[in-house]
């Protein structure tokens, strides 16, 4: 006990810097902060990629409606790639598979559904799929199950 009291009054004590305990505590706090920032960053990347896919789906549906109105026929385009959406699609296809279903049971293109499904092995893999149809219904899906709207 006398050694403890003596060190307390020693003016040269701890002049060289922090103790190992203080260093380890500082390192632990830094690691927790870095881990938190990384989680927030990845969440923001997923949200940004999802927003890009949603915007692409909205643009595709808008192009389909414009085609429907411009042709005078009661039909939708077979492929929205013909309408200059390729640059937007290239950004989305890094994380989503885009599928178009412009088929009708009678063989006429009187309706459409465009689906963006997250690719496995990407940061979006745990995110739900997105879809939009000719009525403007915007759905979030988990496989074939509808789990909400966007």
Image: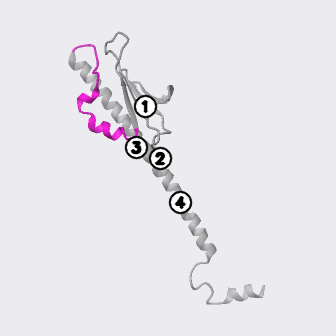
Q: Position of residue 135 (x, y in %)?
A: 37, 20
At mark 1, the secondary structure is strand
**Which mark is on residue 48?**
3
Q: Are marks 3 and 1 in contact (CB under 8 Å)?
A: no
Q: Which of marks 4 and 1 is in front?
A: 1
Identify which residue is drawn at 24% across, 28% down.
82
Q: Quadrant of the C terminus?
A: top left
Q: Do the residues labelled 2 and 4 touch (CB within 8 Å)?
A: no
**Which mark is on residue 43?**
2
Of the numbered discs 3 and 1, the one sitting upstream in the chain is 3
Q: How far apart are marks 2 and 4 (CA)?
A: 16 Å
Q: Where is residue 84 in the image (x, y as percent from the top left)?
A: 23, 33
Q: How far apart are marks 4 and 1 (CA)?
A: 33 Å
Q: What stretch is highlighted in magenta?
A: 72-95
**Which mark is on residue 130?**
1
- Which one is nearer the viewer's eye here, 6 or 91? 91
* Residue 93 seen in render: yes
> Callout 4 environment at 10 Å: few (<14), some (14 to 19), or many (20+)?
few
**Which mark is on residue 106?**
none
Of the numbered discs 2 and 4, the one sitting upstream in the chain is 4
Decide whether residue 150 is among the magenta residues.
Answer: no
> Callout 2 environment at 10 Å: few (<14), some (14 to 19), or many (20+)?
few
* Residue 150 seen in render: no
At mark 2, the secondary structure is helix
Q: Are marks 2 and 1 in contact (CB under 8 Å)?
A: no
Q: Where is residue 95 in the image (x, y as percent from the top left)?
A: 40, 40
- Left or right: where does residue 19 sit relative to residue 105? right
Residue under pointer 4: 33
Residue 97 image-quadrant placement: top left
Q: Distance between the residues labelled 2 and 3?
A: 9 Å
Identify which residue is drawn at 48% across, 34% down.
128
């Amino acid at each position: 006990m006398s050694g403890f009291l003596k060190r307390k009054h020693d003016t040269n004590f701890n002049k060289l810097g922090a103790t190992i305990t203080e260093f380890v505590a500082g390192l632990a706090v830094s690691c927790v902060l870095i881990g938190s920032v990384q989680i927030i960053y990845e969440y923001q990347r997923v949200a940004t990629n999802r927003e890009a896919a949603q915007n692409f789906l909205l643009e595709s549906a808008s192009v389909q409606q414009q085609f429907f109105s411009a042709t005078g026929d009661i039909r939708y385009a077979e492929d929205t790639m013909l309408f200059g959406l390729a640059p937007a699609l290239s950004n989305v296809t890094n994380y989503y598979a885009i599928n178009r279903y412009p088929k009708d049971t009678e063989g006429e293109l009187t309706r459409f559904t465009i689906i963006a499904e997250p690719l496995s092995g990407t940061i979006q893999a745990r995110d739900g799929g997105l879809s939009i149809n000719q009525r403007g219904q915007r759905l979030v899906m988990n496989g074939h199950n509808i789990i909400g709207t966007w």
